[in-house]
Amino acid sequence: SAPWINPPCACQPERMSGGSMAMGARSKHHPKSLALRCYCYAASHRSLTLLVWGLAALVVLLNFHLLVTHGKDDQSGRPREIHRAILRELEVVEEERFQVTPARSRRNPRAVRRKGEHTKPLSVVDEFLDESSAVHDMFFPEPRTAIDPVHGGNDSMYFYHPGRVWLDTDGKPIQAHGGGVLYDERTETYFWYGENKDGKTYKAHSKGADRVDIVGVSCYSSKDLWAWKNEGVVLRGEKKNVTHDLHVSNVLERPKVIYNDRTGKYVMWMHIDDANYTKASVGVAVSDSPTGPFSYLYSKRPHDCESRDMTIFKDDNGKAYLIYSSEDNSELHIGQLTDDYLDVTDDMRRFLIAQHREAPSLFKFDGTYYMITSGCTGWAPNTALAHAATSVMGPWETLGSPCVGGNDIFRSTTFFSQSTFVLPLRGLRGSFIFMADRWNPSDLRDSRYVWLPLTVGGVPDEAADYSFMFPLWSRVSIYWHRRWRLPEGWTDS
Ligand SMILES: *[C@@H]1O[C@H](CO)[C@@H](O)[C@H](O)[C@H]1NC(C)=O
Ligand SMILES: *[C@@H]1O[C@H](CO)[C@@H](O)[C@H](O)[C@H]1NC(C)=O
Ligand SMILES: *[C@@H]1O[C@H](CO)[C@@H](O)[C@H](O)[C@H]1NC(C)=O
């Protein structure tokens, strides 16, 4: 999220007339397969025979491809059938229908007039962002529907409800926006770090973006990725020293933490900026414990370049990387961190040049690197894209939108959210949790979390690179679910 830049550079979803809406949902099972649709109009015997042989050859080749790409499952010891059954649960395609009624929503007519004689109909995204709209309420359900790990009862156990208020084990809404999750091997615990935005939303000046003063970076711990205990603010905003990077009037976004095996330190990287987003820097903090306190070290412009939305990624071999939006958010940069993770090395590559992507989140599967990014439309949701590379430094290729299910509007808005992190599920090869933020610019502290299953497999929608008829990359799919939970056996332990 860099609300500083506003020209929308990603496709806006189709405009629809406003009005109150109701959602209906239906589910159907779609075992993922290649749907080969053939239309045979008065086919001659000759072409029919050709077609049959062609299809048979295709089936043989596909089986060969599946054998190659899934061969490793057999070595892992986990019976493939069980793994498939578990994945099928996550890969149910769930559809959403909007029912647009002719009546206007309960929007205040005076508010509409004040905003100015809208002759053009409002888009769903406009309504979604407008706190006086019923559409807004639909995507920011009331606190009484909150996910409550303590008082929710056994029937609600482990269910994620994307977009609902999510309470911690003290019964308070989780404040960990733009965050990421660290799995700490030493304590066998997950730590979720994110922006604590528990303050008043305001504009620093009339042309400024909606903002909240820096509170700090929150940390929550969990063993099951569902019930989160508040470990407090592990890096605090600075109240007095106005020249300090963390002074409350500045911006701290997208904190991520990785563990350095050599130094035994937990290292946090974050986006540091001033209220006008002109500083465009990264900040680094360090701690001996995952629960802090973190000591803030410094900020800098990596490779002497602007850096706004960013993330860090630790590879299996212990090398770590910084990925950031640069050059007015028009391109992404990637560079390796030093061995202690406290700085960047000089080597930097530019990619997705002139594509205007932000909110990067990187993950790895089967030796291939994948990334999800969003477009740059401030707090407004837009279309996510998946990218892939055989080397983390690139070249990176775009695979298309990863979103599956919901409906056109859901998919074109990434289910009304923006990517922040992709969390590998230990014990479920090829399965991840896609973590995203549903920003609420009228009250940023009430921004919601959208967690959905992400899987890698199958054939991507768009891919320029093919080898021997088959795409080099697998499809990245994020499945919409109103309510879902991790299948049994998602963790080895
Ligand atoms: C929830 O399940 C646990 C263990 O199965 C049981 O002891 C407890 O009574 C249940 N609680 C409710 C409210 O059903
Ligand atoms: C205020 O912060 C700046 C920048 O971090 C630092 O150089 C300075 O020493 C701090 N001043 C006080 C009084 O702590
Ligand atoms: C941000 O921009 C406004 C208007 O251009 C200016 O008044 C203000 O001083 C700037 N603030 C910072 C922190 O640069």
Image: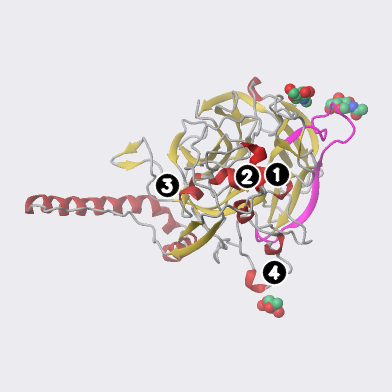
In front here: 4 or 245? 4
Q: CA distance from mark 2 to mark 4?
A: 29 Å
Q: Going 71% across and 50% down the picture, which residue do you hit?
A: 446
Where residue 475 is drawn, which disc sits there?
3
In front here: 204 or 16? 16
**Nearer the viewer's eye, disc 1 or disc 4?**
1
Dot 2: element: helix
Q: Could you tell which of marks 2 and 1 lies nearer the N-terminus?
A: 2
The three-letter amino acid code for the residue at tag 4 is: Gly
Q: Quadrant of residue 333?
A: top right
Dot 4: element: loop
How far across and down, in percent of the image, does residue 307 sit? 65, 28
Dot 1: element: loop
Q: Is residue 131 left or right of residue 236?
A: left
Quadrant position of the C terminus in the picture: bottom right
Dot 4 alpha-carbon crowd within 10 angstroms: few under 14, some 14 to 19, many 20 or more? few
Q: Which residues are magenta?
A: 223-252
Q: Farthest right residue?
A: 240
How far across and down, in percent of the image, does residue 398 sit? 44, 36
